[in-house]
Amino acid sequence: MLIFICIGLQLEQSVNMKNTIFIILAFILFIGGCSTTNLVYRNADLYLQHKINGYASFDPDQQASIEREVSNYMHWHRNNALPEYIIFLQSLNKALPSDTPLTEYKVAEFRAVLRHQYKMTVAPTIRPTAQILAGLNAEQISELGVAFANKIQEQRNDSPKGNIEEILDKRSKKILDFVEWLAGNLSREQEKKVIQLNSELPLVGEIFIAFREKNQKELLKLLNNHADETQLSEHLAAWMINPESKRSSIQQQFIGAFEAGSDHMITQIHALLTAQQKVHVRNKLSSYIEDIQHLVAE
């Protein structure tokens, strides 16, 4: 099912952020600018269908299949993924507001859990996605290729090559916005420190964009060569669930450096927070834990 296109690709599009606990927390909770977890989650199926339909023109049978698969996925997600998110948020809520220094080792442990949850979230979409993709006609494959190319261009326009200051500035704003959402208003000194920490992280955006573009082209080639479900599933799984198997050693080195730098940045941001800000963190996380528990109980 092309729910993969929406969930899988959007996850992978943010993969350079996914190892930063603050950023992945926002994604896991389906925040998306809405006011409550319940509101967003209850409308997630409609949102996903809308996003999927933006990739190609589907016939009535395909539309019905997409609707069915999205519904099945959301049912699975409520029963299987949400309980995992609760456990993660509860452990996070114990660690982040604590007066005990947050270590890079602990952050790496959280990152490993997040990677597991990411794979768990994407895995059920692989086979149904391959089934839908295998049924696309030449015109639909062409539309999919155009949609891929347009989104790649949008991402490159958002991170222009050579303009390092602009890229760092945009990344700093995203991090600052999220930290303030989680911990409350930051002082000017805290903001300066976060900006400094961000500047020390490697720039890996183009690595991920190029990796995504390469895999999209491979997918389109498979589709044009009439690959079957098994071949498509293998490609999607390697791309989305085990990307390390498709990355070069240089790409892996840069990503490893980014992950280590992110771990360090998180520990430093945690050390910057005041007692009041840590209370804000606990209250924020507790409210989302309660919301997700209500969803699971329904």
Image (cartoon, rainbow, N blue to C red):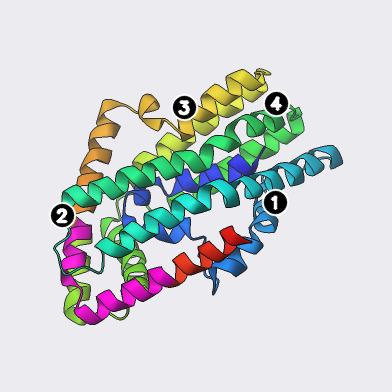
Mark closest to the chain's N terminus, 1 or 4: 1
Are the residues tagged 2 and 4 within 8 Å (C-beta)?
Answer: no
> What residue occupies the far front of the structure in this picture?
297
- Please say whether residue 32 is visible from this viewpoint: no
Q: Give the range drawn in magenta.
A: 265-286
Callout 4 secondary element: helix
Work out whether residue 163 or residue 251 is closer to the camera in this orientation and state it.
Answer: 251
Tally of marks: 4
Give the percent coordinates (x, y) of residue 66: 73, 42
The quarter of the picture where residue 259 lies is: top left
Write down the residue under mark 3: 238
Mark closest to the chain's N terminus, 3 or 4: 4
Mark closest to the chain's N terminus, 3 or 2: 2
Q: Residue at x 62, y 29 (%)?
A: 127
Q: Which residue is drawn at 14% across and 62% down?
A: 101
Write down the residue under mark 2: 103
Give the percent coordinates (x, y) of residue 112: 31, 42
> What amino acid is at disc 2?
Thr
Q: Marks 3 and 1, how far apart in space? A: 24 Å
Give the percent coordinates (x, y) of residue 186: 26, 79
Q: Which residue is drawn at 17% across and 51% down?
A: 104
